Image: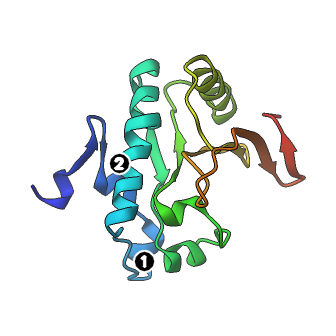
Amino acid sequence: MTTAKKNLSPSFTLVEMTHSSTAVARDLDNTPNATQLKNLTELCKKILEPLRKEINQPIKVNSGFRAVKVNVAVGGVSTSAHCYGLAADIVCPRYGNAKTFCKFVEKFLKDNNIAFDQLIYEYGTWVHIGLRHPDGRQRRQVITINKYGTHQGIV
């Protein structure tokens, strides 16, 4: 099976979970190692795929895995779960704006008792979902990050 066709779950491919226009533009390798690939697969199977089936709409991955150099290039925090294959920034334009989608994701996770680390409504534009913290914790944090700072809940 070629990398381009490798599915991590029925609806999510390795290519979409590792694509980075920044990596392409700067010629940075964004290939996950075996552990990162395992984490990406788990993220897809435990959170993204069930969410996709529930919403019955395509989910666009803006950013999934980021190698450390790619993460630095995009201005990501040094402890980013993206670097471990444990997080994705997603949108679902057919469902509605990012805030509406984030509220849906929060309810979906709660209603289905799906463990997660962070659900972040970021800058009014996308939803960050983290499977677990790099240290293994699943804190079930729901926060908003915007130009005014970090806030508890979706605001």
* Residue occupied by mark 1: 25
State the separation of the CA atoms marked 2 and 1: 26 Å
Query: Of helix, strand and loop, which one carries label 2?
Result: helix
**How packed is label 2: few (under 14 Cα within 10 Å), some, or many (20 or more)?**
many
Residue 56 in sight from this viewpoint: no
| Disc number lying in front (2 or 1) | 2
Q: How many marks?
A: 2
Determine which quarter of the picture holds residue 34.
bottom left
Q: Locate residue 133, reporting x and y percent.
A: 61, 54
Q: Percent from the top left, x then y, of residue 9?
A: 29, 39
Residue highlighted by disc 2: 41
Q: Quadrant of residue 154?
A: top right
The local crowd at label 1, few if under 14, some if 14 to 19, many if 20 or more residues have their Cα within 10 Å, is few
Residue lying farthest to the front in this orientation? 136
Q: Which x, y percent locates residue 36?
A: 40, 62
On screen, residue 146 versus residue 110, left or right, reads right
Give the image location of residue 88, x and y in percent: 51, 50
Q: Indicate left or right for 105 with 84 as reference.
A: right
